[in-house]
Amino acid sequence: MKPSPVPFSPRRVALIAQNTLLEAARQRLVNVLVFLAFALVLGARGFRDFNFGAPELKFLADCGFGAMAFFGSALTIAATAQLFFSEIENRTALTLLARPVWRAEFVLGKLLGVAALAALFCAVLTALLIAVLWTRERELMREFPESFGGAQAVSYATVATAGLLQALKLAVLAAFTLLVASFAQTQLFTVGAGFFILVICHLQYLAQDAYARSASLAAKLVGAAIGSAFPNFQLFTVADTLVAAEGPTALQVLRIAAYAAGYLALAGSLAILAFRNREI
């Protein structure tokens, strides 16, 4: 492969990311998923009588965190696959790469665009969840002041931290989905593989523990390989609580952010490598 005649440009990466974000905003599926997530958070108060005994504020928070995780994951996987393959199928990627644009710039731009979309989704949904919790908490404090003792029951900083960690998780998911898209031939395969990766990342700690308890050396090596190759998405749920004392410390958040950055770099680098050898 001949070296590029122009140097790598962060500005071109930013322009591709901006175009990716704008294109995502025009996708019907993205808008539908965002609408469903907002509807679930806003409508959670209507379902609080069916929470099977859980405290009302905790139930509202669980609905918000669940909507952020489920619809955010679906949005990230679908947007990554759709936006990548639309460039391939419409031949716009070929036109773009015919100009002085690196393939690495194209991949990084797509990744940053989808990561920005996921971050924006989490930020808006977190703000909406905080507004719902704050409104309902004020109502409950007026109705049952003796239950609160004049103090807030919700740590809104912890709720905001949960939104931040969800955004980091979705960015990692986008990187792994983009890695599959960089060598896959169809959008459907990429979407299916993206959801498969999502399940593995949420359950890999169980497989790792099972292999670790095995007496077989080969099984332990397999468990270690799974634990190293796929991130543990359970780490990103440590802030899914309303109590500050039960939430993560600042040091834990920094460690999780570094953990996410490592997998972002790994999956992003592999996606660039695979896309360099792909025929468009």
Image (cartoon, rainbow, N blue to C red):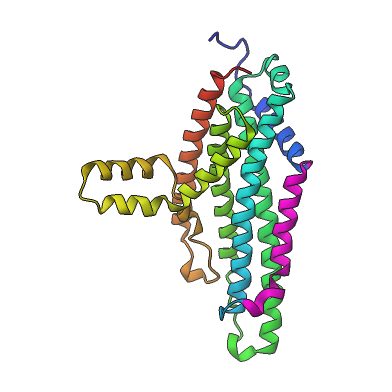
Judge from the rendering whether residue 214 lies leftward or rightward of residue 129; answer left or right: left
- For this rendering, which residue is in front, 6 or 216? 216
Up/down of 240 relative to 146, above or below: above
Quadrant housing residue 279? top right
As drawn, the residue found furthest toward the bottom would be 146
Q: Going 54% across and 49% down the picture, which residue do you hit?
A: 169
Q: Going 68% across and 51% down the picture, which residue do you hit?
A: 121
- For this rendering, which residue is in front, 265 or 205? 205
Visible residue check, residue 149: no
Q: Is residue 34 magenta?
A: yes
Up/down of 98 relative to 256, above or below: above
Q: Going 53% across and 32% down the picture, which residue do you hit?
A: 268
Visible residue check, residue 280: yes
Q: Is residue 279 magenta?
A: no
From the top left corner, tell me how far across and down residue 31 is, in percent: 76, 49
Quadrant housing residue 35? bottom right
From the top left corner, tell me how far across and down residue 14 is, in percent: 68, 31
The overriding secondary structure of the stretch rendered in magenta is helix
Q: Quadrant of the C terminus?
A: top right
Q: Going 54% across and 33% down the picture, which residue do you hit?
A: 180
- For this rendering, which residue is in front, 15 or 43? 43
Q: Which residues are magenta?
A: 26-50
